[in-house]
Amino acid sequence: LASEAGRLRVRLTAAGRRVRLGGRDVSALSFNGGIPGPTLRLKAGDRLSVRLRNALTDPTNLHVHGLHVSPEGAGDNPFVMVEPGDGFAYEYELPADHPPGVYWYHPHHHGTVADQVSGGLYGAIIVEDPEPIEAARERMLLISDVNLDGSGRIAVASPMARMLGREGEIVLVNGQVTPRLSARPGERERWRVVNTCVSRYLRLRLDGQRLQLVGIDSGRFRNPLEVEEVLLAPGNRADLLVTTRAGTASLRAAAYDRGGAGGMMGGAPAGSLSGAVLLATLAVSGDAVAELPAVSAQPTPRDLRSATVTARRELSFAMGMGAGMGGGGMMSFTINGRQFDAGRVDTTVQAGSVEEWTLVNDSPMDHPVHLHVWPMQLMEENGRDAESVLERDVVNVPARGRVVVRIAFDDFAGRSVYHCHILDHEDNGMMGVIEVR
Ligand code: C2O
Ligand code: CU
Ligand code: CU
């Protein structure tokens, strides 16, 4: 990891790795030997050079989730494939007005994304604030979940788990089981939380402590919002301020009902998805410190509610019985009736336009819809207007629901993808190709 003015150079090696998990030795995957991989810190206008080396036994590649960078060539190109033993040199150039916030990186090799991410291949990217927000400390909290098999390997997900979206019984924060954090009363901490889980939704709570939400994904509130809980779908990030009060608090995820197979898969378990779970504890004791002054107002993006919409389209997310699967009852996951094909362009967009997309969920479970490169602004959810303009790159579309977003394609042309961020659904074909030209 080397940084010079305006440029960060990193080598990332994806490899197998033995780790301690809940008192057991487990073979996992990691970038540079750590779970998570190294945190990459950037500023708007910076260049990021990543030399990826593939020391796995399967192909892989790299995606910088949420960064607003070119999808072409050696940029954030989801069509690059890196064979075992090979490498690839990625070059990313952040625009001078790139929004600050929490982003992350992970492999994006179609068909094995869920296995590789849940195996441990993920890390955080921070784009720093132009005007730092004062805090006693900053914590990264990358949350993941895994299942182990009898021989201490990360369990191979069953066909059923791949359809529902696998969830692990062991939920980890930075690769650890329920870590203990400590602070003094009155301190303000900055928490950067990433939901790296393949399918688990995290309804985060930290009862007894003051929680303020600075932003979600690349979106930011003008003033931090006082919250009781924050819902992070797979792929979402939260930028939080915690002002501590004496006592011991539990960081936990409350149960979230993300739907299920709705009888489409015979005896599929119902109601066992994204259950309540303890993530970490925060012990606050000692002498109180003086509270910091309130955070000043933050710049917010252009409000697309008043923009002229140049095109409208509808994307329908569905699951159905797959054909030609030998009658084994495999589900197929589709967008507008089609499964992913890297050689087909599903959506062609004119550069410079503002589009309005209606995301329709034609299935009994939630789908967190993710678009690369170009952030979405949430306009409407199930007919209700969104309360604030927030740019997001993963928007949850509730079971049988519909969500309206607007997207400004005002820079970067090229080919990229949108998909469900339940990575098992993406690996099962719920992904489409977009070309902006
Ligand atoms: Cu985080 Cu296309 O993914
Ligand atoms: Cu992404
Ligand atoms: Cu999905």
Image (cartoon, rainbow, N blue to C red):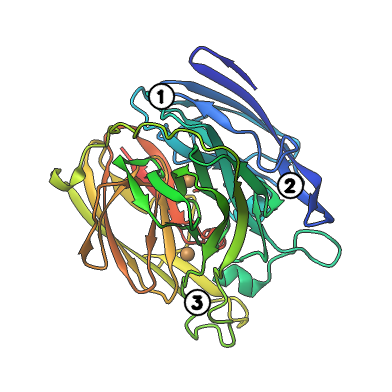
> Residue, x 21% and y 40% (percent of image)?
353
CA distance separating discs 1 and 2: 30 Å
Q: Nearer the viewer, residue 366 or 228?
A: 228
The answer to whether residue 245 is seen in the rendering is: yes
Q: Position of residue 293 (x, y in %)?
A: 36, 31
Q: Circle 2 — which element?
A: strand
Q: Which mark is residue 260?
A: 3
Residue 267 to residue 408: above or below: below
Labels 1 & 2 near each other (Cβ < 8 A): no
Residue 212 to residue 13: above or below: below
> Residue, x 53% and y 27% (percent of image)?
41
Q: Mark 2 or mark 1, which is nearer the start of the sequence? A: 2
Snapshot quadrant of residue 228: bottom left
Three-letter code, disc 1: Ala
Q: Circle 3 — which element?
A: loop
Q: Nearer the viewer, residue 276 or 314?
A: 276
Q: Residues within 10 Å of mark 2 (few under 14, many from 20)?
A: many
Q: Nearer the viewer, residue 84 or 357?
A: 357
Q: Circle 1 — which element?
A: loop
Q: Nearer the viewer, residue 394 or 254?
A: 254
Snapshot quadrant of residue 88: top right
Return the residue found at the far top.
5
Q: Is residue 222 left or right of residue 364?
A: left
Residue 95 to residue 374: above or below: above
The answer to whether residue 80 is seen in the rendering is: no
Mark 3 sits near ligand 3, with its Cβ under 8 Å away: no
Residue for badge 1: 44
Q: Residues within 10 Å of mark 1 (few under 14, many from 20)?
A: some
Q: Mark 3 or mark 2, which is nearer the start of the sequence? A: 2
Snapshot quadrant of residue 401: bottom left
Residue for badge 2: 29
Q: Mark 1 or mark 3, which is nearer the start of the sequence? A: 1
